[in-house]
Each structure stands twice: as structure tokens, then as C-alpha cells.
Image (cartoon, helix red, strand yellow):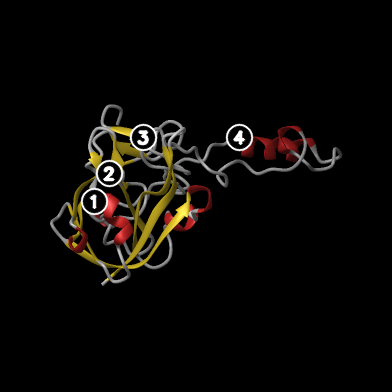
Amino acid sequence: MRGEAVAAGAWGSSVAAVAALALLVGCAAMPGGGGGAGGGGGPGGDDRPAAAAPAARDAARAQQTVPEVPRRSSAPEANRAASPPAPVRVELPDLGIDVAVRPVGVDSGGGMELFDDPSLAAWYRWGPAPGSGAGSTVIAAHVDSLEYDVLPFARLKDAAPGTAVIVTDAAGTRHTYAVESLEVVEKTAVDWDAAFDRSGSPRLTLVTCGGAFDYDARTYLSNVVAIAVPT
């Protein structure tokens, strides 16, 4: 999505679905741990005794080199469950937030993308969509920019528990949520595994920057993370 989206911070990948956001100008994060190969052992990752049978050792090494690839059902197309439609709009009417949403993935470094136009919010397309049966739907946007000044998501910090959130999907369905919790957390302390979790009860996670601003690094030091549940 070069030219349309920029890496704005993420920990994770389309396989692991573990991403972290670090938003705004000059703010970026690289993939976090947990997705690497198994550790332990000497060269080649083989920590078994030297007396192990060569054939067994070679087979184990060969197995370690097989890349994990996305798996797809072999069932006929008609028998596959359709994916829920993508979100196209997010609103918090009480706060005057009404922003178009577009899907994004990850860049070559594993970072979640955000759009060059910070008036657009980004939905992490490798995670759940509104209407999914489980997991966290992640929508993120810039808080402000040098070109566009303060943006709608700057008001996210004022989303008290119970604040209504409406996400409209590509089919025109309006999914309603209520804010359950909101935190301003230092970026190094945010629980990104929970934010991008594909399991558990359906929920919506809204993210932007907040807290103190580091003028030397030109980045915010914290994230505003709001969790909303379906109503």
C-alpha cells in the first residue's frame, strides 16, 4: 500500500496476528517477540545427544526448515463460511468522531500500516472484523499531524465508559458497541497480545496516540486504548 499507507507501528504479522501500534509522525515500532523459531540447543537448533541416530537427526533438521504457510480449507467454495464484511466507518457520536475506515495489512518489516491521509482510520485486516464470532477488531488512527492539525481521534481520550461506538461495515450493517474501558498507557507497557487477540468475546479495540509528546523524537510516549463491547 505504498503511497497510500505508511508503517505507523506494529508488533506482529498476518500469521501471528500480534501487532502493536505506535502512531503519529516519526513513530514506528518493529515486530515483537513470540513469533520466532524455537530456541535451545547448539548449531542448527539440535540439542539432542551426539549419539542420536543420524537419520532421525537429519529428519528433525529437515522438518525445522519447512516454512509455515497459510492454510486454506479444501472444501468447495460454496461450503466455506463467508468472512464478515470489512468496516468502512467508525463513529462516536457523543465525541463528534466520524471517520472513514480502510483495511491495512503489514509492511515488509511486519509493522501495521496507517494511511498517509490521517483523516482515515485503519482496520487491521488480518484480525477479526465487526460481526466476527470472537476476538478483537482493531481500528487505529492518528491523533494529529503537522499538515492536518488535530484530528477526530484526538477526542478518543474523552470516551468514558458507556460511550456509544458505531461501526458500519461494507454491507451497510451498523454494529453498535459501548466503551467498557479506556487507558492511556506508555507504549512499552501496552498489552498488545490482548489488543490483537483473535480469541475470546467479540470486542472492538480503538487505538491512537496520547500522553506526553517527545519533541526531540517527534512522537507521543503513550497510546490511548479504548475497549468497547457489542451492545
Locate residue 178, reporting x and y percent.
28, 69
Q: Can the viewer see residue 197 in this picture?
A: no
Q: Amino acid at mark 4?
A: Thr
Give the CA distance from mark 2 to mark 1.
7 Å
Instruction: Name the residue rendered at 69%, 40% in the picture.
Output: 60
Instruction: Name the residue rendered at 71%, 38% in the picture.
Output: 45
Question: Is residue 148 shown above or below 82?
Answer: above
Q: Amino acid at mark 3?
A: Val
- Residues tagged 2 and 1 counted as in contact (Cβ below 8 A): yes
- Callout 4 secondary element: loop
Q: Nearer the viewer, mark 1 or mark 4?
A: 1
Q: Can the viewer see residue 2 in this picture?
A: yes
**Circle 3: is it few (<14), some (14-19), or many (20+) Cα within 10 Å?**
some
Mark 4 = which residue? Answer: 65
Give the CA distance from mark 1 to mark 4.
35 Å
Question: Is residue 207 shown above or below 182?
Answer: above
User: Any mark on residue 72, and which?
Assistant: none
